[in-house]
Image: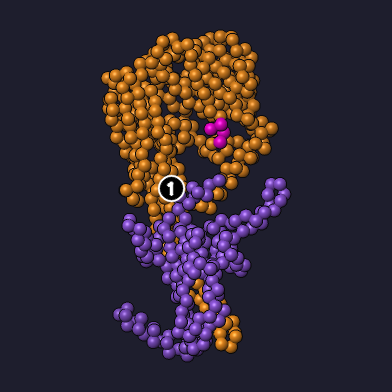
Chain colours: A orange, B purple
Amino acid sequence: MNPLTLTLCAFFSRTTHTALIALLLLAGLWLTAQTAHAATAAGTMISNQASATYTDATLASRTATSNTVVTVVQQVASLTLSADGAKSVTAGGEVSYPHTLTNTGNGADSFALTNANSGGYAMTSVMFYADADGDGIADNAIPITSSGSLAADQVFKFVAVASTPGTAAAGSSNTLSVTATSSFDASVAASNTDTTTVSGRAIINVTKAMDSVSGPSPSGPYTITLSYGNTGAATAGNVTLLDALPTGMSYVVGSARWSATGATALSDADNTDDQGGIVYDFGVTQPNRATAVIAAVAAGAGGRRRIGSKSCKTSGLSRALASENAATLSANRCRAATW
Amino acid sequence: MKLSAFAFATVAWASTPAALAAHAAAPLEVKLTASKVVTEANGVERLLPADTVRPGDIVEYRAEYQNRGTDPARNVRATLPIPAGGLEYLPDGARPRAVRASLDGKRFDAIPLRRLVTLANGKQELRPIAQSEYRFLRWDLGVIAPGKSATVSSRMRLVSESGRQGAQP
C-alpha cells in the first residue's frame, strides 16, 4: 500500500543568496581543513636529505649533502560507523535503520557488512541495502553484503532492514548488532546496535523528500513531499505534521495537496477548518511553517514506504538544506489509548 | 652475477680521477638514516628500520657529520628538512636541543616560531605557529676537527586520523 502524502511547493528566494553562499563557503573551508590534515595516503614516498654549510681551511664556504633516505607510507585500515538506532514496530512488521560508514583509513578499502541479533525474539530476516541519498530508505531491492571499494575518506550510506516475527510479544525487544569489517585488515571493525521494541500501539513513520536537492538562487518551484504511514497495530488520531521552511525558501500559496483528497488544493489561511479529514495551514499557526493535523491514520495505512524512483545527486548545499529542513511529527489525543 | 657487477661498478667509480678530486675537496661527509621509534609495553624504546611507516608512526632522522679531511671544518651549520606532505615536527624532538626552525629554509628562528597576526580589533600580536608548519631544522655545530664527527637528530610524526581530529577548529 502506498503511503499517504502531503506536498507543498516553495521557491529559493533571492533574499537568501548570501546565506546560501555563506553555507557553501563554510562547507568549502571545512573540506579544505579536512584535506590538509588527512592521514597521509598509502604509497606516498617520503624522501629526506640532510645538508651542512661550513668553511674549510682556506676559509672558502662549502656545502655537504647526505644520501637520500626514502620511506614509503603503508596502508592502515580505519573506519567509523554511525549511528545506533532504536525503533518501535508492530509484530510481523519491518524496521529500517540507517547507517553511515566512513573509510577513515589512508587507502582504498571495502568493508564487509554482517549482523547478529538477540533478545526477546529473533528477527526473521536482516538485510542490508544501499542508501546513497541518505534518506533512510533502501535505494533499491538489491541486498548487499559489502560497502564496495571506498577511497580514503569516502562515505557509504546504507540501511539495515529487519523483519520481526508475527509471534513477537508486545513489549519484547531485539538487539541487532551491525558490523562493518575492513577487507584490508580483518582486525579492524566497527559496530552499531539497533534496538527494536514490539509495540501494540500506533506507530507513525514520516519521511520527507524534495524533488530537487540543489538549485541556484532564485529558482523553483520545488515540491516537498512528506510521506507518512502507520505501521502499528492501532489507529493514530490527530497526527500532526510540522514542516518549517528553511531560511531562503518561500512558500507557493495554494500549492499544498493531500493524497487522500487528490488534486484539491488545501487552503492555507485557516488553522481550524476541516478539509476532509485534515486541518492545514501555512504561516497561521506559526510563521513560515506548514502545519497539518490529520484526524486519523489507520493501522496498516502506509506500509513499506518508498518515494518514487528518485535518484538525487547530493551537494554540500543540499545536505545543509536537508538537515535544516527537517520535518517534525507529533500526535496527540490518540484514539488508541495506549499511544 | 649481481655481486660481480656491483664490484665492477665500485672499482670504476673509485678510479675516476674527478671523483677522487671531489672527495678530497669535500672532507665533511653527511650520512642520513631514518628509524621508526617503537615504544614497547615495558616502556623501552626500540629503533626499527623505517623503510615503511604507517600514519601515527614516529620517525627519527639522524644525520652524522664526519670530517674525513685533514683540516677542521668550521662554522658547521647542519640543516635537516622536515619533509612536507605527512611528517610533522614533534615538540622537543630535536637533539642537540639547541636548534632553530624555519618555514622556508632561509630564515631560522628559535622554537617556538611565532608570526605576527592581525587580531579582530586591528591590533597585531605575535602568535605561535603550528609545529606542523615547521619545514627545516638547523643546528650550529661550530668546529668539527679532522677525524671527528657530530650527530644531530630529530623526531617527527606521520600525520594520522587522530592528528586530524586535533586540528579541527
Assess whether residue B152 is covered by the magenta stretch. no
Tell me if I can see residue A136 in this picture: yes
Tell me if I can see residue A48 in this picture: no
Is A203 on the left-hand or right-hand side of A261?
left
Q: Label 1 lies in what chain?
A: A
Question: Where the C terminus of chain A falls, by quadrant?
Answer: top left
Residue A67 in the image: state x and y as whole percent: 46, 74
Question: Where the N terminus of chain A falls, by quadrant?
Answer: top left
Residue B132 in the image: state x and y as whole percent: 53, 57
Q: Nearer the viewer, residue B133 or A153?
A: B133
Mark 1 Cα-neighbour bin, 10 Å: few <14, some 14–19, many ≥20:
many
Give the residue type that dot 1 points to: Thr
Is A202 on the left-hand or right-hand side of A290?
left
Q: Tell me how many marks there are.
A: 1
Q: Which residues are magenta?
A: A320-324
Q: Nearer the viewer, residue B66 or A197?
A: B66
**Residue A144 placement: quadrant:** top left
Secondary structure under tag 1 reads loop
- Seen at 28% across and 25% down, the residue is A120
**Residue A15 placement: quadrant:** top right
Residue A214 in the image: state x and y as whole percent: 58, 36
Is B31 on the left-hand or right-hand side of A117?
right
- Seen at 50% across and 81% down, the residue is B144
State the residue position of label 1. A104
- Seen at 43% across and 52% down, the residue is A106
- Seen at 56% across and 12% down, the residue is A279
Residue B72 in the image: state x and y as whole percent: 52, 85
Q: Is residue B121 above or below residue A170?
A: below
Q: Is residue A173 above or below residue A66?
A: above
Residue lying furthest right: B122
Give the overall secondary structure of the magenta segment.
helix
